[in-house]
Image (cartoon, rainbow, N blue to C red):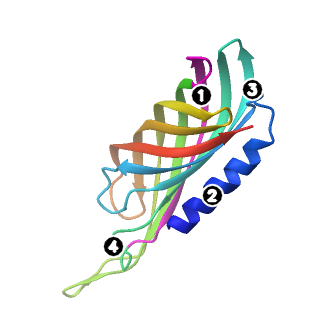
């Protein structure tokens, strides 16, 4: 894992080094969730891309996509899953453009399968389980290089889970994410 992290950092650094330091139309980042309230899945990794739609002085509006990868805690019973979160965010730069406070609102959706399990003489069916809902993600970015930043945010997911064989449930989940990114 350290080799992959080092390689990603070197690629992001080399991309940003040759870029104009005042232009930050695109942002790419990777992060890891330190907190996850899900009982079936481990803390997710996520990657995101943002595009600056409009800018006024220190304020900008971005359109983005965040993709989550969840590995299952019970891989014999549940598949791993990918979650997608298209979003709109607003950012404000301050402290000589070294800090960026942001908030994003978006729509989250994912899907995963459970495999049949045997409990005594009862066999549970294979199920396709889908989750969707609204996300709210306040955060902050610190630019330690004009185009490279560290990112910390909290993602609040208010979701509904639909299961083919059981009743639908609603629930909330909170992810506390730390990551690294590049703006160019």
Q: Is 142 left or right of 56, judged from the image as shown?
A: left
Q: Residue at x 62, y 30 (%)?
A: 88
Indicate the position of residue 3 as horizontal and vertical percent values: 56, 68
Q: Earlier in the sequence, mark 1 or mark 2?
A: 2
Give the residue pinned by disc 2: 8
Q: Is 34 left or right of 97, judged from the image as shown?
A: left
Above or below, 91 relative to 125: above
Q: How far apart are marks 4 and 1 (CA)?
A: 34 Å
Q: Residue furthest top?
A: 57
Indicate the position of residue 4 as horizontal and vertical percent values: 57, 65
* Magenta: main secondary structure: strand
Above or below, 53 relative to 28: above
Give the residue pinned by disc 1: 89
Give the residue pinned by disc 4: 74
72 and 184: which one is in front?
A: 184
Q: Residue at x 36, y 76 (%)?
A: 77
Q: Earlier in the sequence, mark 4 or mark 3?
A: 3
Q: Is 89 left or right of 26, judged from the image as shown?
A: left
Indicate the position of residue 161 as horizontal and vertical percent values: 40, 51
Mark 1 lies on a secondary structure that is strand
């Amino acid at each position: 894992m350290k080799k992959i992290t080092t390689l990603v950092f070197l690629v992001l650094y080399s991309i940003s080094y040759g870029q104009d330091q005042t232009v930050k139309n695109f942002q790419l980042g990777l992060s890891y969730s330190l907190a996850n309230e899900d009982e079936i899945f481990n803390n997710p990794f996520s990657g995101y891309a943002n595009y600056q739609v409009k800018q006024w002085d220190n304020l900008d509006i971005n359109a983005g996509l965040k993709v989550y990868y969840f590995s299952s805690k019970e891989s014999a019973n549940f598949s791993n899953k990918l979650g997608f979160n298209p979003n709109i965010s607003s950012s404000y730069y301050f402290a000589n453009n070294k800090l960026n406070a942001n908030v994003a609102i978006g729509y989250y959706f994912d899907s995963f399968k459970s495999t049949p399990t045997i409990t005594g003489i009862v066999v549970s069916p294979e199920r396709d389980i889908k989750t969707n809902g609204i996300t709210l993600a306040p955060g902050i970015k610190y630019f330690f290089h004009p185009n490279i930043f560290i990112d910390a945010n909290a993602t609040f997911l208010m979701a509904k889970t639909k299961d083919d064989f059981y009743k639908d449930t609603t629930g909330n989940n909170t992810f506390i994410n730390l990551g690294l990114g590049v703006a160019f």
